[in-house]
Image (cartoon, rainbow, N blue to C red):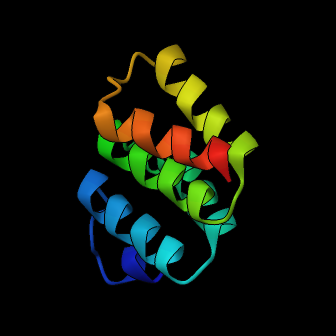
């Protein structure tokens, strides 16, 4: 909300940075909430933002949430890449 107050437009790059910061600080749940909240700001999720969310879940051993994001990518016709698959496999191995 502070970014909105300051007039900073949230886009995919901003969301990715915030999601990665949440992951780095061990707040996987905030990372997932941000990923799901992109719609509220009319920002379309993309491969990079979803990969960041999957990675956050993987680091926290939250394989079920990582798989949900992985599945949502197919549902939303978001391209999956090597990072998507690697992060999802890593999440499931923890």
* 2, above or below 85, in the image: below
| Residue 79 picture quarter | top left
Q: Is residue 20 left or right of residue 34?
A: left
User: Measuring 54% from the left and 61% from the top, which residue is drawn there?
Assistant: 56
Pinpoint residue 13: horizontal percent, then vertical percent.
Answer: 24, 58
Figure quadrant of the C terminus? bottom right
Is residue 92 visible to us here?
A: yes
Foreground: 23 or 82?
82
* 67, above or below 62, in the image: above
Q: Exactly how many numbered labels are in the figure?
A: 0
Is residue 45 visible to us here?
A: no
Q: Is residue 6 left or right of residue 37?
A: left
Pinpoint residue 16: horizontal percent, then vertical percent.
Answer: 35, 60
Pinpoint residue 46: horizontal percent, then vertical percent.
Answer: 33, 37
User: Measuring 52% from the left and 75% from the top, which residue is drawn there?
Assistant: 22
User: Measuring 41% from the left and 68% from the top, which residue is drawn there?
Assistant: 20
User: Measuring 66% from the left and 33% from the top, which residue is drawn there?
Assistant: 68
């Amino acid at each position: 909300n502070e970014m909105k107050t300051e007039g900073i437009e949230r886009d995919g790059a901003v969301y990715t940075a915030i999601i990665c910061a949440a992951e780095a600080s061990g707040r996987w749940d905030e990372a997932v909430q941000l990923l799901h909240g992109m719609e509220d700001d009319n920002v379309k999720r993309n491969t990079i933002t979803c990969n960041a969310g999957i990675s956050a879940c993987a680091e926290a051993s939250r394989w079920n949430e990582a798989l949900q994001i992985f599945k949502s990518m197919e549902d939303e016709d978001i391209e999956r890449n090597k990072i998507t698959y690697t992060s999802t496999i890593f999440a499931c191995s923890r």
